[in-house]
Image (cartoon, rainbow, N blue to C red):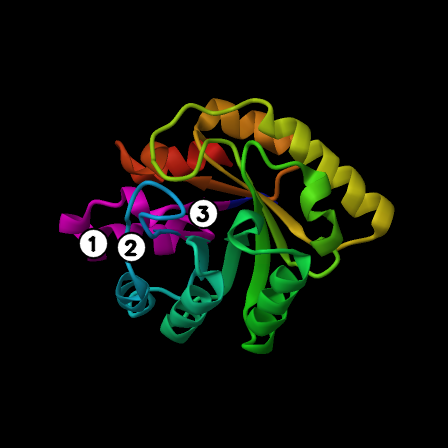
Amino acid sequence: MIKIAPSVLSLDFSKFSEQIEVLNNHADWIHFDVMDGHFVPNISYGPKVLEEVKKLTTLFCDVHIMVSNPKDVAKWFIDAGADSITFHIEAVENHFEALEIIEYIKSRGVKTGIVVKPKTTIQEIQPLLKAVDIVLVMSVEPGFGGQTFMHDSLIKVKELVKLRESLDYNYLIEIDGGIDKDTGKLAKAAGVDILVAGSYVFNGNIVENIKSLR
């Protein structure tokens, strides 16, 4: 069963409590896009937003950190109540550092994952696949909401599905960027487990938009 993870990056903060309540009744996860203005050319929010959301929900809180110092930021968001942390392979020096961060996140009782940017190959993260719970495939360049879906990302999804089956791994495959009812269908057909959608969910009727993704 596909999981729908609306991104609070697109939430209307003037209707914060109201919209979180709608997600409580209709979404599966809540997704947080954390940007530092350095690793990506935009700034979003800090752990305080997660703390406030956690007061209003029992949904799984999925935190994607687009930052230059992933271990530090992972700690802050774990302390704030994150249920999962996904970070970028490009933000670390090598696989050893990535594994150290993965082990730290897991030691805190939190799910962990690695992110694949549009120009990142699956081969670059393959040594980490056995250790992670989630692989997040970016179907846009990270840093901004509302971008157009990159269809090449589906090739990576299919590759991850094959690797998971052939190597008997257990990671979930998540996709983020340009997801709507049409691209969502393509992603589901390719084998995605989790759809992240921001602009599409929050522009208009949230309930109907989530239903259209299922």
- The amino acid type, in three-letter code, at marker 2 is Ile
Tell me whether the residue at label 3 lies in contact with that at label 2, contact meaning CB atoms closer than 8 angstroms. Answer: no
Question: For this view, does 80 lie left or right of residue 29?
Answer: left
**Residue located at (57% from left, 64% from top):** 111
In the image, the segment drawn in magenta is 4-32
Q: Which residue is mark 2?
A: 20
Q: Residues within 10 Å of mark 1 (few under 14, many from 20)?
A: some
Secondary element under disc 3, as helix, strand or loop, is: strand
Query: Residue 150, how many percent across, how many down?
Result: 51, 24
Going by the image, does 212 lie left or right of 136? left
Query: From the viewer's perspective, is 132 left or right of 139?
Result: right
Q: Residue at x 38, y 70 (%)?
A: 76
Packing grade of label 2 (10 A; few <14, some 14-19, many >=20) is: many
Mark 3, other Cα within 10 Å: few <14 / some 14–19 / many ≥20: many
Q: CA distance from mark 3 to mark 1?
A: 16 Å
Task: Give residue 16's mark.
Answer: 1
Q: Residue at x 29, y 38 (%)?
A: 202
> Mark 1: which secondary structure?
helix
Mark 3 belongs to which amino acid?
Answer: Ala
The correct choice, above or below, for 70 with respect to 6 in the image is below
Q: Position of residue 102 (x, y in %)?
A: 61, 65
Q: Quadrant of the N terminus?
A: top right
Q: Which residue is mark 3?
A: 5
The stretch drawn in magenta includes residue 67: no
Type of amino acid at the residue the image marks with label 1: Phe
Q: Position of residue 113 (x, y in %)?
A: 59, 56
Looking at the image, which is closer to me, 88 or 165? 88
